[in-house]
Amino acid sequence: MLPINNLEESLKAAHAGSIPSGEILKVLAESELWIPLPNPVGNDERTPLPIMSIDERPYVVAYTSAEQLRQNAGDVAHAVIGARELANTIPEELGLAINPGGEIGLPIHPPGVQILRGGRKTVKAGESIRLGEPEEDPSLLLGLLRQEFREISDVTTARRALVQVGEDPPGLLIGVTTDGNYAGSRDAVVAAVRRAVSTEPVPLAVDTIFLGNPEEQTLARLFSDIEPFYVRM
């Protein structure tokens, strides 16, 4: 029966026109998705994501619950992953097809997926990354971030840098290292940065990366020459 979780309640409300579609992205960012996988699942290479075409554009198939997966895709092998984590792992040209064929299905177009990943832009092959230090440190913002990170026991260090990808405008990048690779800790860090920026806004886009992430090793090496503004005591 529908709905069985907060995301499905929001989708149902959006279909009824009682909430704006933008609210769905906020709920989706904090939700888990069920991804059907090929059967059998290969062990020796990356498992391909299920892709469908909507208006001749590629979308990753995802469901909002185990029940929606069974109803619309059958009893298939699957993975459960956070929507934000999924958004951060797929190419930026892909959208998300939520509950395709279901009662409360909804396509999330690529710009919506970009919002899910926190506005972060996937770096394409061949794009240059320039990293430096701001001419003037956002001292008030950094002070707030120090306070926030003291409350998150897993944060070990934090650094800041001015970064420019390709020809995009420069932005402020907060590089954080944590003990382990815990989704809860990372969500807490992202939320802390958002709170600090909301309280002390700066005239730059602010993004967060985790320097222990194998996918971020290029930036981690660039950050290695920058002194941390926060070190856990």
Image: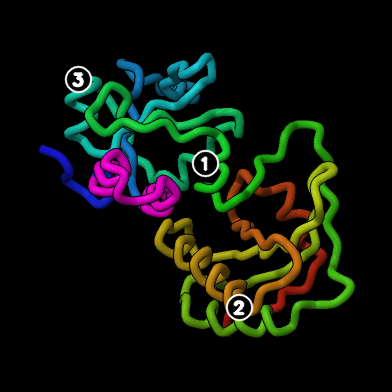
Residue occupying the point 45% across, 20% down: 51
Assess whether mark 3 and mark 1 are in contact (beta carbons under 8 angstroms): no
Label placed on residue 181: none
Q: Nearer the viewer, residue 205 or 137?
A: 205
* Residue topped by disc 3: 74
Q: What's drawn in magenta, residue-wise?
A: 9-30
* Residue topped by disc 2: 145
Three-letter amino acid code at the position of disc 3: Gly
Against 47, residue 215 (above or below) is below
Q: Nearer the viewer, residue 214 or 12?
A: 12
The x and y percentages for residue 142 are 68, 79
Can residue 20 be found in the magenta stretch?
yes
Q: Secondary structure at mark 3?
A: loop
Please give left or right for residue 192 compared with residue 202 in the image.
left
Q: Residue furthest right?
A: 135
Residue occupying the point 54% across, 48% down: 115
The x and y percentages for residue 201 are 66, 74
Quarter in which the C terminus is drawn: bottom right
The x and y percentages for residue 140 are 70, 84
Residue occupying the point 73% across, 68% down: 160
Quarter in which the N terminus is drawn: top left
Q: Is the residue marked by circle 1 packed among few (<14), some (14-19), or many (20+) residues within 10 Å? A: some
Label placed on residue 112: 1
